[in-house]
């Protein structure tokens, strides 16, 4: 038995191939994919050809998905074919130092799953045990597929704690920046978002941003962002959702004395960012960073989505069949204005 799947071979090289249909082994579950979302991380991996922690080519590709259980392996209880499900793209081991310290996102043996851009995806036993969730009957698959990225954002919000009356500057108009905008606005903060792409910036307004600044129009984004804060003092909270050293640097300049900076976007290992040590100390800055998600965040994320507390539909700017994935990824790299595309096998 064969299935169609996207296989990552290297830099900007993804091919649709017929590969063996995986069988569900002991403890495993086979999911028929109904929606897989493109993600900034996938774009990064597509551009770079690999990711040190998550994926080494040649490999099946894609990690945000929802679907229907097709088969369950021996020893699986509580799950049966036909159930509508979503799963995280990883699962912690449960007994390393970090797992015991309740920091399972830092698990030393985090098991990653890739292969959502395919007709079927086999979930390893550990993911079935820790990070497989049933989704409500009325929740569209493409909304449920936001469970993983939103879980990462939720951990960021829990670290940064935007509050009523605060001014939050968000750097980045991708899906992550737009999810942060929604949640910060919901928490009562006034949101100033800096980004680019006319469509993304239009959507930012409907995602809770009170002020939207287009980087394409700004010579000095730091001054423009500061000027948009009360008395030009700087932001109470800056959330960096770009993943480039320049944006990390800007975040540290836009925050007010006594403020908080959430450095959310991952830069390649070894990246150095200049730090004004005087500013950090004498202005008493709080620097925060979060990575990935936890089983608790995954559950909370699905609850928010199912409860309609976050709007996912404006963040899906396209739909495409699996065979178009390579051209969609190339186009997303080029235009930088789409948000997420829902890929359906
Ligand atoms: Zn993702
Ligand atoms: Zn662990």
Image (cartoon, helix red, strand yellow):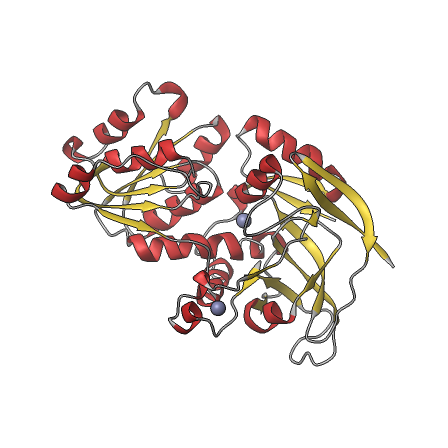
Q: Residue lying at the far left in this picture: please name it.
A: 282
Q: Residue furthest right?
A: 1
The one nearer the camera, 7 or 78, is 7
* Tally of numbered discs: 0
- Kindly tell me whether residue 310 is visible in this rendering: yes
Q: Quadrant of the N terminus?
A: bottom right
Q: Nearer the viewer, residue 3 or 80?
A: 3
Report which quarter residue 16 is drawn in. top right
In the rendered image, the vertical position of residue 120 relative to residue 61, given as above or below: below
Specify whether residue 88 is in view. no
Q: Residue at x 27, y 25 (%)?
A: 224
Q: Residue at x 54, y 53 (%)?
A: 146
Whole-percent x, y for residue 154 in the image:
40, 56
Q: Residue 73 sits in which quadrant? A: bottom right
Against 303, is 2 above or below? above
Instruction: Pinpoint residue 332: horizontal percent, then vertical percent.
Output: 59, 32
- Give how far across and how far down residue 149 sits, in percent: 50, 52
Q: Position of residue 300 (x, y in %)?
A: 45, 64
Horizontal side of 293 relative to 36 (left or right) equals: left
Q: Is residue 235 left or right of residue 147?
A: left
Q: Nearer the viewer, residue 316 or 95?
A: 95
Relative to 284, is 261 on the left or the right? Answer: right
Q: Residue at 28% x, 54% y: name it.
A: 161
**Which residue is painted at 69% across and 55% down in the image?**
34
């Amino acid at each position: 038995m064969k299935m169609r799947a996207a296989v990552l071979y290297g830099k900007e090289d993804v091919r649709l191939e017929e590969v063996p249909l995986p069988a569900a082994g002991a403890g495993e579950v086979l999911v028929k994919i109904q929606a897989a979302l493109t993600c900034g991380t996938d774009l990064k991996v597509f551009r770079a050809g690999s990711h040190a922690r998550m994926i080494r080519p040649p490999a099946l590709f894609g990690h945000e998905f929802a679907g229907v259980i097709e088969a369950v392996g021996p020893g699986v209880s509580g799950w049966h074919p036909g159930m509508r499900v979503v799963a995280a793209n990883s699962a912690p081991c449960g007994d390393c130092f970090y797992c015991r310290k309740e920091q399972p996102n830092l698990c030393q043996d985090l098991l990653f799953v890739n292969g959502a851009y395919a007709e079927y995806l086999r979930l390893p036993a550990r993911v079935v045990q820790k990070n497989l969730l049933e989704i409500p009957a009325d929740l569209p698959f493409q909304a449920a597929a936001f469970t993983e990225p939103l879980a990462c954002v939720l951990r960021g919000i829990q670290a940064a704690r935007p509050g009523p009356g605060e001014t939050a500057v968000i750097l980045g108009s991708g899906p992550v920046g737009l999810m942060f905008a929604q949640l910060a606005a919901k928490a009562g903060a006034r949101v100033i978002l800096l980004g680019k792409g006319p469509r993304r910036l239009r959507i930012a307004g409907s995602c809770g941003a009170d002020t939207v600044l287009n980087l394409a129009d700004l010579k000095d984004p730091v001054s423009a962002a500061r000027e948009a804060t009360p008395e030009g003092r700087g932001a109470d909270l800056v959330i960096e959702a770009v993943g480039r050293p320049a944006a990390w640097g800007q975040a540290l300049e836009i925050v007010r004395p006594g403020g908080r900076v959430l450095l959310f976007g991952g830069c390649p290992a070894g990246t150095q960012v200049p730090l004004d040590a005087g500013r950090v100390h004498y202005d008493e800055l709080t620097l925060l960073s979060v990575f990935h998600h936890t089983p608790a965040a995954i559950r909370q994320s699905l609850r928010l989505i199912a409860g309609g507390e976050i709007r996912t539909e404006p963040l899906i700017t396209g739909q495409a069949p699996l065979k178009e994935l390579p051209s969609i990824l190339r186009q997303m790299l080029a235009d930088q204005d789409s948000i997420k595309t829902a890929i359906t096998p």
